[in-house]
Structure formats: structure tokens, C-alpha cells
Image (tube, helix red, strand yellow):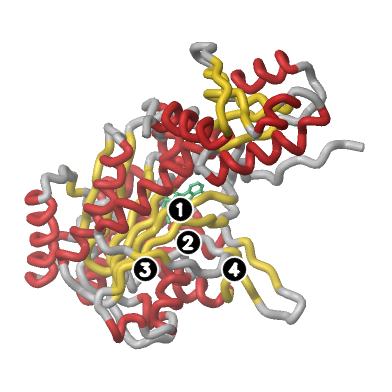
Amino acid sequence: MPAITRPRGTNDLLPAESGLREWVLATHARVAGAHGYELIDTPVFEATEMYERGTGAGTDVVEKEMFSFTDRGGRALTLRPEGTPGVLRAVLSAHLDQARRPVRVQFAGPMFRYARPQAGRYHEFWQLDIEAIGERSPALDAEVIEVAWRFYEALGVTGLSLQVNTLGDLEDRLRYRAALVEYYTPLQDQLCEDCRRRLGVNPLRLLDCKRDAGLVAAAPHIGPSLSPESQSFFAEVTTLLVAAEIPFQLNPRLVRGLDYYAHTTFELWHESLQGAQNALGGGGRYDGLAEVLGFPPTPGSGYALGVERTLAVCREQGLGPAPRREQVVVLPVAGTDIPAAAAVARQLRAAGITAILDASDRRLDRRLAAGARHGARAAVLVGADEAAAGTATWKDLDSGRQETATVADVAGALRLLLTGQ
Ligand code: AMP
């Protein structure tokens, strides 16, 4: 029988890698937490209609990439392709924004998109997300960008490039839309199939096209379509970034072609990531999204950062948690010593030590060697004599030093050895 294989576009997180991901997630939770972002969690699947309305018809995600299904009750559901609509739904339906504005929330979790798998692009991937809901201010946009920046700084990642742009407000975009239609209409024959279709529906989306890159490069910028208010909103965001000493590049091509996006938009790129997959993450302001989902108008700003791409950059730059060898292996000398050894291991754990009981029937010297090989800093031996006397013998696997003492004293000595306190 052929062995079962992993579904296409998915990854296993094996123990050798889990420490790195845990460190990345914990660092993000700490940095976002220091800015006041509290943990939130929402379902992994939601009503398909939420993404059709929220993420938007006319996006690649909704048109081609959703994992949608009908449940046994006939409901149309979708595995979440992004986090923002679900978080906004959760926050607004619990009326959190009535008690406090903005509501600052953060989360980490898996997302699902049916895009052709390749390096840095999977069917299942993780995102780190923050959302600040209920306030329209340049300061909040600058804050959201700063949290992402400080997160990568805390990891020690270098070589980042922060791209920022503004999409103005709805009226600015109507003017910009008209300018794009005027530019693209005579060029229709040169457009790819998707772009030709989208020109009538949502011309801003054409600026995302990789195939028509030459045409995109020559397309008009949004600048001349911006009202003085939108210009000053964006000027304030960039002034705050300068004051925070966060370097950035203005990128007029950075667009989100949906009506509910507004003002600030940004992406973080990394030099080591390839081609179309060079973005670690991105975000911006989405002031019209709440209404699209059927809630009262509520402004919001946030980001999503890709965990797998962040891990790839950390690996490439040799970043990760400080290596730790904080465990001990507990070895019954003979099979009959297993209950006494298990009791010693229990006492050590109660004293805060990671104690792994090796009750296999291999020879003692083999078990000692295996313990050292798998990262134990010390071994604790329990034989008939120790069991009778209520003691244990511990051995420093680096120096070879060995000592017999009461279990309480052994626990104290091991704690000192493992943690220095
Ligand atoms: P987006 O929600 O499309 O702005 O994506 C934000 C970030 O999530 C991207 O910059 C990537 O780091 C990550 N991401 C998006 N789609 C995928 C995918 N299919 N596989 C892996 N990471 C992804």
C-alpha cells in the first residue's frame, strides 16, 4: 500500500523548526502587545459571502483561490484566505468599538489560498496580524507600520524595504479611476485577458498585473487625483515615520484595488525573497470594509505578515532563539527501578525542570549517550541503592562530574546547572 502523502501546498512543522516559529510568534506577540494589541481569535472558516463582499469580487483571492465548500446543512463556507474581515466582524458584532476606540487586536493563525504552490507560496500558510479598529488618523497608520517595523527589528532582520503609498479617499479614487480608464482604453488590445475584463470592473486592479508590467510602469500616478485633505493625511503619516526613524520608499504603484481601502497602504519587502514573492507582508487602511460587511461605517487599519517567508528570512540570516539545553534525562538503572526513577522525574518536573524518562531496555551507557546526543545537559541515575535511600545520582554530561544526593538537593543542583539560578 502506498504511504499517505502530505496534501499539495502544505507544510509540516517538525520539532527541529518549531522552536524558530515559536520564537517568531512570541516576538510578534510581545512587540504588538507592547503597543497595546490584545489577542483575538476567530474561526478558521466563515461564510463565503463574507469574503465575496469583504475581500471583494474581482480579486485573485476570491476569483481563483478560495477553498470553499458546502457543509452538511447546505451553508456556503470558506477556509479563511485572510484575517481582516473575520476580525472586523468579530470586533463589531461584539460592539467592542463602543467601549474603546480604537480597538487594538492581534492574532496569528493559518490562512488558505489555492494559488499555484512554489517557494514562499502555499495552500496553507500562517499570518501574523494586527488590526486597529474605530479611528481614522494618520498617527494610527504610522503606528501600524511601526509595529511591523519594530517586530522585524526585534527579530534582528536586516535588508528590509518599506514601501508606502496612499490611495486617497473614495472621491480621489473615482478621479484616479477615470484617469486610468482614459489611459488604458486605447491600449486594450495589448492587455492580458484578466486586465481587459477588469478594466470595466475595477481599473485600479490593473496596476497589480505582473504580465502587463510595461504598461503599468507608464500608467498615471494617483498623486494628481488626490484632494488637499488626502495629501495632508498622507504627509502626516510620512512625517511620523521620519520622526520614528523608520526609513521608507514612496511607491505610487502600491495599490489595493477595492473601494473600501483608503489612504495609507504599505508593504515590507525583503531582498532575499524572490520575484513576485518578495513581500514579507503588507497592510493599510480599510475605512469602507465595515459597511461592506453590513456594519455601521467604522474605520480601520492593519497588516498581515507571512510567517513562512519570515522564517525563510530568519533562516537565511541565521536568526533564531538562543540555543538552550535545559533538559535532563532520567535513567532507571534496571527495569525494576522504573517506578522509583519515574517518581524522581516527577519531583524534578515539580521543581521546574524538563525531565525525560528513558525507560527503554537499552544498556545504560547507550542511554547516557543517546541522552547527550538529543540535547540533555545532565543525566539522573536511579538504581536500587538510590531508590532505597531516597537519593539520586546526577551526572553533568559535559564535564562528567557525578554526585549522589537527596532528590531535593539534586533538583537544586540541576536548576543551578541549567538556568544559573
Ligand atoms: P496579503 O494578505 O496577500 O497581503 O499577504 C500578506 C503576506 O502573507 C504576504 O506578504 C506573504 O508573506 C503572506 N502570504 C500571502 N499569500 C501566501 C501564500 N499563498 N503562501 C505563503 N505566504 C503567503
Query: Disc 2 on helix, strand or loop?
Result: loop
User: As drawn, is 243 to the left or to the right of 15?
Assistant: left
Check disc 2 and report the residue beneath it: 82
What amino acid is at disc 4? Phe
In the image, what residue type sits under mark 3? Leu
Q: Could you tell which of marks 2 and 1 lies nearer the N-terminus? A: 2
- Give the residue pinned by disc 4: 45
Extreme residue toward the right, this view: 1
Image side of residue 102 versus residue 304, left or right? left
- The extreme front residue here reads 389
Instruction: Give the SS element for disc 3.
Output: loop
Q: Is residue 213 above or below residue 409?
A: below
In whole angstroms, how far apart are the C-alphas of marks 4 and 1?
Answer: 15 Å
Confirm if mark 1 falls within 8 A of ligand 1: yes
**Helix, strand or loop under label 1:** strand
**Taking 313 as reference, is 212 above or below it?**
below
Q: Is residue 20 above or below residue 229?
A: above
Q: Nearer the viewer, residue 394 or 112?
A: 394
- The residue under label 3 is 258
Q: Residue at x 55, y 46 (%)?
A: 350
**Amino acid under disc 2:** Glu
Q: Quadrant of residue 185?
A: bottom left
- Residue, x 25% and y 70% (percent of image)? 173
Q: Which residue is mark 1?
A: 127
What's the mark number on residue 302?
none
| Position of the N terminus by quadrant | top right
Q: Is residue 40 visible?
A: yes
Q: Nearer the viewer, mark 3 or mark 1?
A: 1
